[in-house]
Amino acid sequence: MAASLITKALKSIKNPNPINSFTTFRTRHLSSVATVHQPQQSDDPSSSFTFSTPSNESNDDIYIKGRKQEKASSSVTMPMSFMTGSIVGKRFYKKVSTREADDGNGWTVMLDYRTLKTPSKRPLKLPTLGLAKAIGAEWEYQQTDGIRPFTMPLMKLACTALERVPLTRPKVIGHLMKKFNQDLVFCRAPDDNDLTSGVHERQVEKIDPLLKWVESEFGFKPVVYSSFFGGKQEDGLVMAIEDLLKKTDDCELAAIDALAAAAHSLIIAIGIFRGKLQIEEAIELIRLEEDLQVDKWGLVEGGHDIDIADLRVQIASATVFLGLSRKN
């Protein structure tokens, strides 16, 4: 739902389609991304987000207030109350618009005459007009009976990129690299077993081209393994991937982090980042083994179908965010 509105909103922008594939999908909340230890500061003791303008001030800005955290946060994303299916407050605005930031550097979202701000009361200053319009479409979608943050994946990613990534960048990169050796695409089913030979053949067909691309792109051949405990990649490949992550901007790193969390694969995330993989191609690789089981035993309604829809939300929203955040 939110994704279709985003696509509709972008029609008014010149060259609005930075991604070649964006499939309409059912909306569910996104999974958490890289684990870090960053306190969430707020002066509001409530357990969910509220939207208000202080009555004793003349400020026209809108603040999104989050629950007060006494312990260090376990996620680089927004607090869990922003990602669940809770309704956090009634819609208090009528018109959503965008305008250029006051300093001329970026774009902001306006709810009526008020400027939208992040949970830490900083301006939600976005790098491109396209991203601002897409986030504006998420706010426009909200119903009169309440604000549903779980239908705003682009808003969540924007706040992550603006607030959390700059403060926790080394920890985000460290978390991604810690799991690199256990990447999904490096794990290979045994080919000497009747139960797994079909999976092995499909992996060779679908995943090997991606591994060959990694070798040509970074100069080191990835090592595949059949152990549940993972293997070890060459130091040169590890250093090349880490160097790539260090050169990303905050929006790019936030998107890669979200993609890697959803895909259980940093390689697939980088494939999307570099333009090697489109959304549906990435989803096919992520679900390769499970889809084989579905083909053999059938689809469980209310289980597999929901998982597929949820995965599409996560992969597509992060991919679209990545494309819309790029200025060129």
Image (cartoon, rainbow, N blue to C red):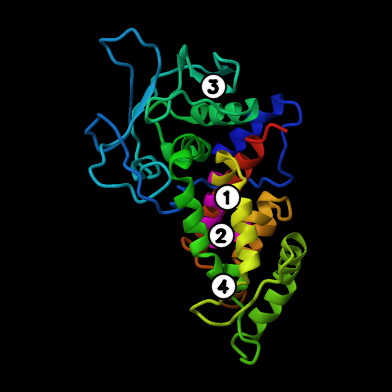
Q: Which image quadrant for residue 218? A: bottom right
Q: Which mark is residue 118?
A: none
Q: Is residue 226 magenta?
A: no
Which amino acid lies under the numbered mark 3 shown in the image of this protein? Answer: Thr
How far apart are the alpha carbons under marks 2 and 4? 23 Å
How far apart are the alpha carbons under marks 4 and 1? 32 Å
Residue carrying label 2: 263
Q: Going 38% across and 40% down the picture, which residue do you hit?
A: 82
Compare marks 2 and 4 and give the one earlier in the sequence: 2
Classify mark 3: residues with Cα within 10 Å, few (<14), some (14-19) or many (20+).
Answer: many
Q: Which mark is residue 298?
A: 4
Whether 274 is drawn above or below 69: the answer is: below
How far apart are the alpha carbons under marks 3 and 4? 47 Å
Residue 280 percent across, percent down from the top left:
67, 55
Q: Which image quadrant for residue 263? A: bottom right
Label 3 residue SS: strand
Residue carrying label 1: 256
Q: Going 65% across and 65% down the picture, which residue do you hit?
A: 237
Which amino acid lies under the numbered mark 4 shown in the image of this protein? Answer: Gly
Q: Are marks 2 and 4 in contact (CB under 8 Å)?
A: no
Q: Which mark is residue 108?
A: 3
Dominant SS of magenta comes to helix
From the viewer's perspective, tell me whether residue 230 is left or right of residue 58. right
In-front residue for pair 317/183: 183
Compare marks 1 and 2 and give the one earlier in the sequence: 1
How far apart are the alpha carbons under marks 3 and 1? 23 Å
